[in-house]
């Protein structure tokens, strides 16, 4: 088994910015397990070797492995090693993120392009109770490679203000920790659509190129629809994956 680092870089330990490195590594491994690239019962490399291959400190790796152990995805056997425990339901920060690299897995990261509070445009489906929403545009990468652009609308009834610097790598984690609600379910519709004109230069498909397209409505735990999003993904980099076990 070969693991490659998704270039977390020097990450802040605060959830107000990008995810801490140990959580990035944990999430990367969760997605590798989900993709079947780390099979049930597989023995991970020795910790020092694994940390070196990922370019991180052994202590950081051990925090990531402790997170996986706490989720029931790893057996840590003293004197023997760390063994994968694949489960039917893999719960991670990116549990609702369905894009993977063509070969499977891949660590998602997000670059915020803009955050604005606006009146909901007429082409959005009905969701939430407010007339306005917070529009978030992002570039998503998988293992550092641009894979998708997103436009997310959060119903303004959930927060008066949404500041760019406050958002974490995972919006759903930010909703739970900072705004006090969790996304309980989501409904996706998959199609194709042209890349919008606001796409950044880092996204390889040019505007008006037809690519994969995902529309999503998400509901909070109280049953209210709170978010609408649309994503355009590069089919040469990513694929949409849903697994049933």
Image: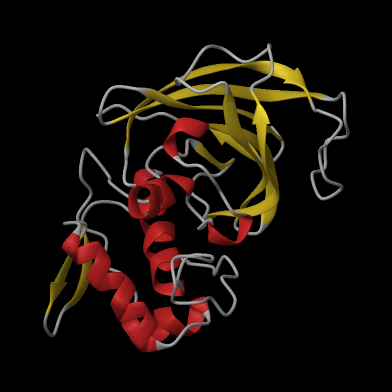
Q: Is residue 179 left or right of residue 169?
A: left
Which residue sits at x=34%, y=75%?
Answer: 45
Would you place residue 63 above or below residue 108 in this image? below
Q: Position of residue 32 (x, y in %)?
A: 41, 53
**Of 109 and 142, the residue lying toward us:** 109
Q: Position of residue 201 (x, y in %)?
A: 87, 47
Would you place residue 28 above or below residue 57 in this image? above
Would you place residue 146 above or below residue 148 in this image? below
Count of numbered circles in the view: 0
Which residue sits at x=69%, y=18%?
Answer: 121
Q: Quadrant of the C terminus?
A: top left
Tell me which corner region of the image, top left, top right, bottom left or bottom right, holds residue 220.
Answer: top left
Would you place residue 26 above or below residue 101 in this image? below
Q: Position of residue 211 (x, y in %)?
A: 74, 25
Tell me which corner region of the image, top left, top right, bottom left or bottom right, holds residue 22.
Answer: bottom left
Which residue sits at x=53%, y=66%?
Answer: 17
Tell me which corner region of the image, top left, top right, bottom left or bottom right, holds residue 61.
Answer: bottom left
Q: Position of residue 65 (x, y in %)?
A: 28, 71
What colouring method underlies this structural image?
Answer: secondary structure
Q: Quadrant of the N terminus?
A: bottom left
Q: Is residue 205 left or right of residue 79?
A: right
Residue 68 visible at all: yes
Q: Is residue 192 left or right of residue 36?
A: right
Which residue sits at x=59%, y=76%?
Answer: 9
Q: Is residue 57 left or right of residue 73?
A: right
């Amino acid at each position: 088994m070969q693991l490659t680092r998704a270039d977390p870089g020097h990450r802040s330990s605060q959830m107000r910015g990008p995810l801490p490195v140990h959580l990035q590594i944990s999430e990367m491994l969760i997605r590798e397990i989900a993709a079947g690239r780390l099979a049930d019962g597989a023995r991970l490399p020795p910790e020092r070797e694994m940390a070196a291959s990922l370019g991180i400190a052994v202590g950081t790796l051990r925090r990531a492995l402790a997170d996986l152990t706490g989720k029931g995805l790893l057996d840590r056997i003293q004197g023997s090693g760390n063994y994968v425990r694949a489960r039917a339901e893999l719960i991670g920060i990116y549990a609702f993120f369905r894009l993977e690299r063509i070969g499977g897995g891949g660590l998602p990261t997000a670059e915020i392009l803009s955050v604005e509070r606006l009146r909901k445009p007429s082409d959005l489906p009905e969701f939430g109770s407010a007339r306005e929403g917070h529009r978030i545009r992002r570039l998503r990468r998988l293992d550092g490679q641009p894979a998708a652009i997103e436009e997310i609308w959060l119903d303004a009834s959930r927060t008066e203000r949404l500041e760019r610097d406050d958002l974490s790598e995972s919006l759903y984690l930010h909703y739970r920790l900072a705004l006090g609600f969790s996304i309980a379910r989501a409904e996706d519709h998959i199609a194709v659509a042209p890349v919008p004109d606001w796409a950044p230069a880092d996204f390889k498909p040019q505007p008006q190129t037809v690519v994969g397209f995902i529309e999503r409505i998400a509901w909070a735990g109280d049953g209210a629809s709170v978010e609408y999003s649309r994503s355009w993904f590069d089919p040469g980099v990513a694929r949409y994956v849903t697994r049933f076990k």
